Amino acid sequence: YIPKENSQNYDYLNRLISRLEKNKSTGVVVVSTNRVLRTRTVSLLQRHNFIAFECLTATDAMQCLSENKNVRLVITDNTLPDMTGTHFVAGLRKAFSKEQLSIMGIAGGKGMLMSAHFIKSGANDFLRVPYCHEEFLCRVMQNVEYIESVEEIRRVANTDYLTGLPNRRHFFYMLTVQHQNLSEDHALALIDLDFFKSINDTYGHDAGDIVLKAVAALIEFYFPDEIISRFGGEEFCIYMPSTSLTEACERLEDFRKVVEAEVIQLPKTNIKVTCSIGVSGAHTQRVDKLLSLADKQLYAAKNSGRNQVKC
Ligand code: GH3
Ligand code: MG
Ligand code: MG
Ligand code: MG
């Protein structure tokens, strides 16, 4: 469905068309007791491929949000049975920031201050009822795209560009989140590639990059339930919750053998690489202690001839 007023505006059209595909995985919650307003709004959203949820109360909407992680926008009327729309918005904002969830107030009537009330309560936007379809769609798109661009910026900020693994910054963030329920048993491993500089020197920096990507893929495959990270240049870190030091060392010894056996294909030749691993375990709950201990063990592994695990 393309509004005819826009059939000449090709930039807008292209944007609309590319959105149609993305909208299929984008949830929008519509909250109103006004049946006509609610069903019209929902069908307009559905015509543009959005997954639209109809809710009659603030409580229903909260429930819907907790069950559907794909919701990027809530559109709410001001007179709801269980609370006013602006109270609902203020409550929603305690659970979701403006960067996580867009909220748009909609309300009719002659009151001039309604949009200000909504926006002061934490709404991103406001639209007066009856609304014009075009304006409604522009605003929906703008609010959804805002959330998506913040998500994209977050993803880029948390990811190592070369390997696609979580970067060091994100590793610490995930650890802090996990830290609240750190189990007694846990372990941390630092993995450092052996003589990596000589791979760069012999085969070139691009070959070094291929090796880093290959090792990162192995880590991702063998530690799917652990918190992993590219920690620095040719150094990786793995946090293993609910794992004893003994169990961690066995798994890392297995992994060391996997790396040793892996044949990495370069454009002109195949090469192999080894790694040294330092592991620390349960006797401290402090992440900085775990790290410095693992680093000491890694240093010991290097000094005892490399290609080994030290626990
Ligand atoms: P050791 O066995 O003692 O760990 O020796 P090493 O050569 O692996 O360690 P060293 O710290 O001397 O060298 C690490 C090298 O990793 C130096 C740096 O140029 C290279 N490096 C860091 N990041 C990247 C990257 O993103 N790509 C490539 N190709 N090389 C990188
Ligand atoms: Mg080094
Ligand atoms: Mg190294
Ligand atoms: Mg290193």
Image (cartoon, rainbow, N blue to C red):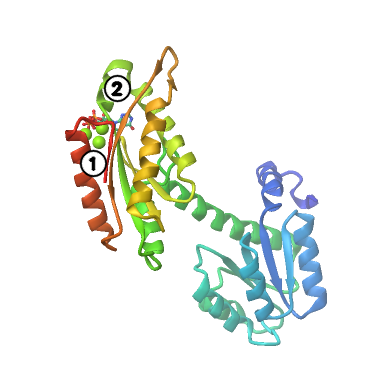
Look at the picture and state if 256 lies above or below 51.
above
Coordinates of residue 114 in the picture (x, y in percent): 61, 81
Q: Residue at x 22, y 37 (%)?
A: 301
**Is ligand 4 within 8 Å of the beta carbon of the residue shown at mark 1?**
no
Is residue 155 left or right of 281 when viewed as pictured? right
Question: Which quadrant of the picture is home to ligand 2?
Answer: top left
The local crowd at label 1, few if under 14, some if 14 to 19, many if 20 or more residues have their Cα within 10 Å, is many
Q: Amino acid at mark 2?
A: Asn
Coordinates of residue 229 in the picture (x, y in percent): 38, 45
**SS of the residue at dot 1?**
helix
**Spatial distance from mark 2 to mark 1, Cα to Cα?**
22 Å
Is residue 300 left or right of 193 when viewed as pictured? left
The local crowd at label 2, few if under 14, some if 14 to 19, many if 20 or more residues have their Cα within 10 Å, is some
In the foreground, 263 or 165: 263
Q: Residue at x 77, y 52 (%)?
A: 5
**SS of the residue at dot 2?**
helix
Q: Residue at x 76, y 81 (%)?
A: 33
Coordinates of residue 164 in the picture (x, y in percent): 45, 40
Q: Looking at the rendering, which quadrant does residue 137 occupy?
A: bottom right
In the foreground, 175 or 186: 186
In the foreground, 82 or 291: 291
**Is ligand 1 within 8 Å of the beta carbon of the residue shown at mark 2?**
yes
Is residue 188 left or right of 83 when viewed as pictured? left
Q: Looking at the rendering, which quadrant does residue 117 occupy?
A: bottom right
Q: Which residue is mark 1?
A: 298
Q: Residue at x 27, y 29 (%)?
A: 194
Q: Nearer the viewer, mark 2 or mark 1?
A: 1
Q: Which residue is mark 2?
A: 200
